Amino acid sequence: MDYLSRTGSPISDALWAQLDAAAVGVARNVLTGRRFLRLTGPLGIGVTSVQIDDLETKSEVLKDGFVVTQGRKLTAIPTLYEDFSLLARDLAAAEQAGFPPDLTPVMTAAQTAALREDRLIFLGNVKLGVDGLLSAPGVNRQKKTDWSAGENAFSDVAAAIDTLVLKGVYGAYTLVLSPALHTQLQRLQPGTGLLEIDRLAKLVGGQLYKTPALGKDQAVLLCAQPENMDLVVGQDLAASYLEQRDLNHHFRLVETVIPRIRRAKAIVAFE
């Protein structure tokens, strides 16, 4: 079955390849969660759910002849989408002139879709029953001081690392900032000869990122080892054909993804 409805559509293979390249190219520049989370998949569009284990509470309980696994839940993998259209006359004009078609609509849609994925990863979605890095039960929460002053940011992140170590969470640490916080840290720290952002990057071994999914004043430190969390991908981001309406071509960017958090204690959210 052609889930993306490409077979039989009036779109040529060459144009499909251009659409895919444009969408993936833009999404790759926006996506942040995929830069540090291990990807499990793509598993295929037919995989509609995934089991998520809480490694702190997972156990088998034997009672009355039944074995029940506690600390495990089965969660549906949500479908994320964004629609766009290409005008038939624009495609015909580009083909007749021998020029590449204007793919701005798919690029814009890919940017929106990528940010939607990051918001799902970091913030989760209550209606869908999806826990994010900041919203999962059991996440460590630490009060954030004023990161625009002194060594507050460095001290806060160092304290968060200590929290993870004390809870038995070891490995490479990743720090993700909102754009506003990232900008605040672009200042020279007196007596060090370093920008504060560079000191933080060294503290976490270079694993420092920013994303607009975190809003204006949020940050999160985590140990993104696969035993703690990963990102499950069913259908990776791809363009599908919806219909030809009013002579114009309508498409849908679609993907199925879900963050899987196994050990929420491997995360420190700054509040």
Image (cartoon, grey):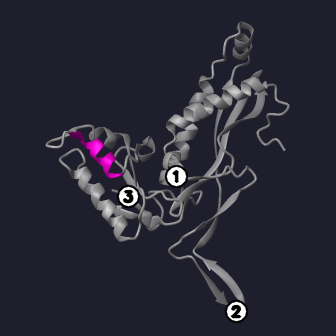
203 drawn magenta: yes
Q: CA distance from mark 3 to mark 2?
A: 42 Å
Q: Amino acid at mark 2?
A: Asp
Residue farthest top in this picture:
97
Where residue 185 sits: x, y (%)? 27, 41
Quarter of the C terminus within the rendering: bottom left
Left or right: residue 193 versus residue 37 is: left
Q: Residue at x 32, y 43 (%)?
A: 181
Question: Residue 37 — which label?
Answer: 1
Reply above or below: 51 against 121: below
Q: Nearer the viewer, residue 211 or 76?
A: 211
206 drawn magenta: no
- Secondary structure found at label 3: strand
The crowding category of the residue bearing disc 2, from other C-alpha atoms within 10 Å (few below 14, some 14 to 19, many at least 20), is: few
The residue that mark 2 highlights is: 64
The residue that mark 3 highlights is: 269
- Secondary structure found at label 2: loop
Q: Nearer the viewer, residue 248 or 265?
A: 265
Q: Residue at x 67, y 49 (%)?
A: 42
Q: Assign the magenta stretch its main secondary structure.
A: helix
Which mark is nearer the camera, 2 or 1? 1
Q: Amino acid at mark 1?
A: Leu
Where residue 235 sits: x, y (%)? 69, 47
- Residue stretch rendered in magenta on the structure: 194-204
Where residue 203 sits: x, y (%)? 31, 51
Q: Quadrant of residue 130?
A: bottom right
Q: Earlier in the sequence, mark 3 or mark 2?
A: 2
Q: Earlier in the sequence, mark 1 or mark 3?
A: 1
Left or right: residue 168 versus residue 67 is: left
